[in-house]
Amino acid sequence: MDKKKIIKAVKLFLEGIGEDPERGGLKDTPKRVAEMCEEIFAGIGVDSSKVIKVLKSEDHDEIVLMKDISFFSVCEHHLLPFIGKAHVAYIPNGPRVTGLSKLARVVEIESKKPQVQERLTTGIAESIMK
C-alpha cells in the first residue's frame, strides 16, 4: 500500500470539497486516513486459503458450522463501510477438517478488501473449497 499516495489523495479530496487540509482539525487527517486504509484494506493481495490448515481426523460426514462471525468491509462502489455477521458451514471431505478459528480468519481476510457483499461470500467459499 502506498501511504504517500493516499495522503496526497486525501489532501486533494479535502481541497475538492472546499476544505482547507491545513486547518487545525484536518491537518493530520490525511495521515490518519492512510493508517486506517492499512488496517481496513489489509486483505488486499492476501490469499485467505493459505490460513486453512487441513487436519486428519476420524471420518466426518456431518456439517461443521461457525455462526455469528462479526466483520466489516468497504463497498467498492462508494467506499462506504458495511458490517455484518457471517455464518460459515461446510461438510468435511472424509477425514479432512479444519479448525473453527481458521474459518473466522478467512472471513476476516476476505472482508478487508473493497467489494460488494456477493464477492465477499464468493471469496470465503472459494478459500474454504481450495
Image: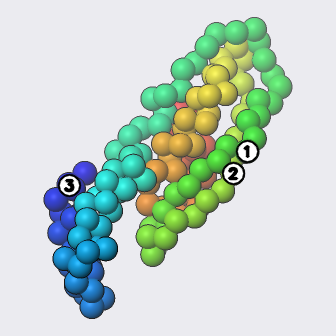
Rendered residue at 73%/36% (across/down): 66
What separation in Å lies between label 2 and label 1 (alpha carbons)? 5 Å
Discs 2, 1 touching: Cβ within 8 Å: yes
Q: Amino acid at mark 2?
A: Lys
Discs 3, 2 touching: Cβ within 8 Å: no
Looking at marks 3 and 2 on the same chain, the residue that comes earlier in the sequence is marked by: 3
* 58 sits to left or right of 119: right
Which residue ends up furthest to the right in the rendered image? 62
Query: Can you give x and y, in whole percent of width and height, for residue 119 in the image?
Result: 54, 57
What separation in Å lies between label 3 and label 1 (alpha carbons)? 33 Å
Q: Which residue is mark 2?
A: 85
Discs 3, 1 touching: Cβ within 8 Å: no
Q: Which mark is residue 68?
A: 1
Above or below for 70 versus 52: below
What separation in Å lies between label 3 and label 2 (alpha carbons)? 30 Å
* 127 sits to left or right of 32: right
* 107 sits to left or right of 19: right
Q: Which mark is residue 2?
A: 3
Which quarter of the figure has residue 25?
A: bottom left
Rendered residue at 21%/56% (across/down): 3
Query: Can you give x and y, in whole percent of width and height, for residue 90 in the image?
Result: 72, 34
Dot 2: element: strand
